[in-house]
Image (tube, rainbow, N blue to C red):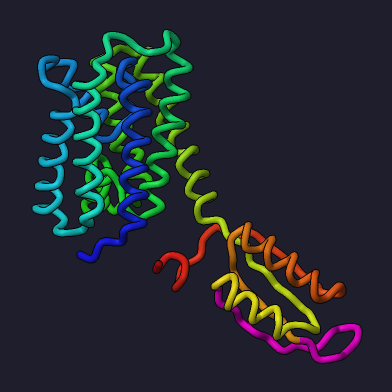
Amino acid sequence: MKINFKKFMLINFGVFIMALGLYYFLLPENLAVGGAIGIAMVINNIFKFIPIGIIMGIVNIFLFILAFLVIGKDFGGYTIYSSFLLSGIIYLLEIITPLESPIIDDLTINLIYGIIIQGIGMAIIFSQNASTGGTDIIAKIINKFTHLNIGKALLLSDFIIIVFATFSFGLKLGLYALLGLIINAYVIDNMIASFNERLNVIIISDKSNEINDYIINEIKRGTTIYVANGGFSRSEKTIISTVVGKRQYIRIKNYAQGIDSNVFITMGLVNEVLGEGFSFD
């Protein structure tokens, strides 16, 4: 497997951020909001002498073996790597900074900050088409045998873990964990949308050649050229279409207005772009 260095570093960063949210906010409060970490927390409550990081590693090994036997090689190397990296970081944090109690004596604050920090980390990982394994694997197995879609299967598998956590840690923490699961889904969805957000820019100008060259050579983005007739003037117009990031749009707008005071520009949000230069980097 060819390693993309940027992708590799982003996954490492995302896993590290996720581990901080889990270890310093959710774990001390026994907030098992799903995933392999939730399973590990329930098991650790029974076998307290085994570090959670070790339990996570064992759970992931079991899940990957189960996935290989049931659904084949339908998971990537980055997912395997990030799942064990998360287990390793949690284990190291348990050794380096063991926690006797939550760092903040407020369950609600720990839930909110833990979920937000963990959610940011997960969103970074998901944006690189990877995951941390855990209930993603369980969801794929459920999907295979029930034809339930992956999103609902994920929710079901995490809910089952929360049910076990409720029996293990009590109704109050179980309800908080359920609330955390809902907030987590919201945080991840919005973070991924912001990562993937691009702008579809349409430009009509008498200086279309210069603007097109600027976008291609300076902004390093592709363009599509249309030739159309103005509805009012009936004159032939050249239309440039391109998809860029927000900062790139500002540069293009400033350049276009600088060389053509009559330039016509429209811009619209695009939540996802697939293709060379974006998802295929």
Q: Position of residue 127 (x, y in %)?
A: 41, 52
Residue sitting at x 52%, y 44%: 190
Relative to 278, residue 66 above or below: above
Residue sitting at x 35%, y 21%: 24
Q: Report the quarter where the C terminus lies.
A: bottom left
Number of marks: 0
Magenta segment: does it hold 125? no
Residue sitting at x 37%, y 35%: 17
Q: Report the quarter where the N terminus lies.
A: bottom left
The image quadrant of residue 200 is bottom right
Q: Position of residue 227 (x, y in %)?
A: 72, 89
The image quadrant of residue 36 is top left
The residue closer to the viewer here, 26 or 185, is 26
- 78 left or right, relative to 255: left
The residue closer to the viewer here, 148 or 140, is 140
User: Residue lying furthest right in this view?
Assistant: 233
The residue closer to the viewer here, 184 or 170, is 184
- 112 left or right, relative to 151: right
- The residue stretch that appears in magenta: 221-237
Q: Position of residue 79 (x, y in %)?
A: 25, 50
Q: Position of residue 42 (x, y in %)?
A: 21, 22
Relative to 239, residue 7 above or below: above
Relative to 280, residue 236 above or below: below
The residue closer to the viewer here, 49 or 10, is 10
